[in-house]
Amino acid sequence: MTTTAPAEAAVQQNPSGAAHPGPRRRPGRIRRIGLPYLLLLPALLLELLVHLVPMVIGIVMSFKELTQFYIRDWGTAPSSGLDNYRVSVDFDAPVGEALLHSFLVTVAFTLLSVGLCWLLGTAAALYLQDTFRGRGLLRALFLIPYALPVYAAVITWVFMFQHDNGLVNHVLHDQLHLTDKPSFWLIGDNSFWALLTVSVWKGWPFAFLIVMAGLQNIPGELYEAAALDGAGMWQQIRRITLPSLRPVNQVLLLVLFLWTFNDFNTPFVLFGKSAPEAADLISVHIYQASFVTWNFGTGSAMSVLLLLFLLVVTGLYLLLTSRGRKPADV
Amino acid sequence: MRRTRAAAAGAVTVSLMTLVTACGGGSSTSGGSNDSPKTLTYWSSNQGASIEVDKKVLQPELDKFEKQTGIKVKVEVVPWSDLLNRILTATTSGQGPDVLNIGNTWSASLQATGALLPWDAKNFAAIGGKDRFVDSALGSTGAEGQDPAAVPLYSMAYALYYNKEIFADAGITEPPATWDELIADGKKIQAKGKSALGAEGSNLSENIHHVFVFAQQHGGDFFTADGKPDFTNDNVVAAVKQYVDLMAKDKVIPTGDAEYAQNQSVSDFAKGNQAMLLWQSAAANLTSQGMSEDKYGIAPVPVQSGTPGGGTQVNSAVMGINLAVFKNTDNIDGARKFVKFMTGDAEQKILNTAYSSIPPVKSVQAESVFSAGPNKVLKDTLATSAAALPQVADESQFETAVGTAVKDLFADAAAGRAVTTDSVKAALEKAQQQMPAK
């Protein structure tokens, strides 16, 4: 009710001096209230067309026996009931077993990548918090991986990871003598570490950018007071910086988690359509099921399952991270 | 805090929506028309050393076609790595080109989608008749018992390319005719500090082409007579093991080649670092990389024993490119005219010369330019000792599943892990289980 009072006061102070009767004020209010929704309408329509409609189609496809025989007119594909889901979660059979393996690889990869991105980003942001000569240059340099086109950046890594002529083996083997013989990075077990390296290299500048923005909002007085009380650097980080960054980190970690879990470009450019088993991320795995093996129904079912998993995880995450903070919201 | 939650919820919504939308699609219309009689779009596969080279080869010919018919052809050269997916997307959306190149091994798989114009008697008559084409090329245009889904455009075969100078330095006077001879020659070449044989261990299609030939030489097949996958029969297992053993046991293929997938082995050969290469129609590619034709010789791919090319000894798959028409083209008459033009005698000679391939058209194949030098080996191979890859609807999935199994086995060999009959059988068993259930 309090929100309407200023509006009424404004009406009474109309420069024309004419008193507006009640019914004539209503269209103006409707316009005012409706305007934001009107402005949102194009975005909502686009969202509907670009995301919601294909999403519903994807869900429908997951209940169909959709192979190359029906792809031209997928609506005619016979219904498969829950078969695509059964096949996907039958972990004793080859399709389900491969999906589970891919899922576990993705979980390990995501946890490591997000953790390292956050750690590096936070450390760099804290380091660049104080003003010093060359800080601007360093900030710009740190953002380069974030600014580069993904394809160009990852292809460069492919060259660097090559067995015979790659820079990585040249440094690790030829110069530092850390390995007995040049390693394979793009095939075999090491491919996981190659993928992780590129992912962290690509992802940490985003964490750096967001944490740096968050740090700007922490009042300097807090640090001054803490310093007067004798708090050291670690105590200040633990007691002031990290708690103050909590809301920022909540969004940052969630976004990094979702992006990394669904990352398709990095593994696809690094390894092509057939990733090594050790680096078989779920996004490429589903792509393979759908567009390489031409099992579009099973691929759709896998996508829906992954969507449900991520919805549950993020729901839980949001629930847990918001617990105990409600009084501050009011 | 509310704002945080709202931002987080927004991020979740947008990020997750992209997951399921990835599998969305549409349907397409069917039946060609003549709504746009003056234009055609053509997807050409990348045949030359680069897309630019292809455009230079094709554009003058397309201009010629426009002059003859008044139909403008807009060409797009599509890299191999993208072509199958692009075709699949076009099939789903119905928004594809009018005419397109397909790999001949995909013919039956793409035929199963129903998106390609069947080449029945009437359509063949419009381009001069089916009899103009050689039988081996027609064998890779679709499933047996059905009208072909495409028309042969360029034919290719695998051959053994060898560096004359490296062979002479190692005291080898003749190219190897059998695998045992190749391994023995390889040891002599390695003793001189050169790499013996190149391979593209991470290229799924290359893997398939080679293991298919090895399987044929062992008397095995990847599919049963009724089209069911049979990847674990003894002959196929022995064939795959023999191919991977060239790296794992015989060590004539360097371990570094296990991660090759971008034709690096061709570059190694062109640079003179490697003595032998198993490749299809490599001449134009080698020339573009600075290796003149007098530097290398060309021989049939080795066989298990005896003389290759004798009719019973398969030493290549029937390779090549077919020309297909999308059924829902807006210029069906123009598309037929274009196929007739591209498979006509004059264009066949020009294009196959440019791409160092063999014309699938009988009258052109008989010309002397395709019966001498390197072309003779390729032509003879196609005529006497090449076999078509399985023309089954699941061929494309087979290439991925078995090609990946061989890639993983090469990775094992490169890492120094043992490649045994059991490990080969297990990899092929896994590949077979990944094939679509019937």
Image (cartoon, coloured by chain):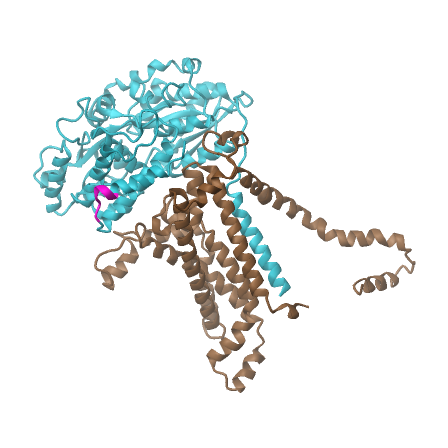
Chain colours: A brown, B cyan
Residue located at (91% from left, 60% from top): A17
Query: Of residues A17 and A258, which is closer to you in this image?
Result: A258
Q: Residue lying furthest left in this view? A: B171
Q: Quadrant of residue B239?
A: top left
x, y percent for residue B408: 29, 45
> Which contiguous range is marked in magenta?
B418-423
Left or right? Give the position of A110 relative to A168. Answer: right
| Residue A205 belongs to magenta span | no
Left or right: residue B227 compared with residue A311 = left
Residue B272, visible in the rendered structure: no
Q: Position of residue A189 (x, y in %)?
A: 31, 53
Query: Residue B402 appears in which quarter of the rendering?
Result: top left
Quadrant assignment for the N terminus of chain B: bottom right
Q: Measured from the top left, where is residue B426 in percent x and y?
A: 28, 42
* Quarter occupied by residue B407: top left
Closer-to-camera residue (A159/A33): A33
Would you say residue A156 is visible in this rendering? yes
Identified at 83% across, 51% down, the residue is A27
Callout count = 0
Q: Position of residue B124 (x, y in %)?
A: 41, 15
Q: Is residue B234 left or right of residue A48?
A: left
On-image quarter of the C terminus of chain B: top left
- Choose between A11 and B236: the one closer to the eye: B236
Question: Does B251 appear above or below B69?
Answer: below
Observer-nearest of B264 and B422 = B422
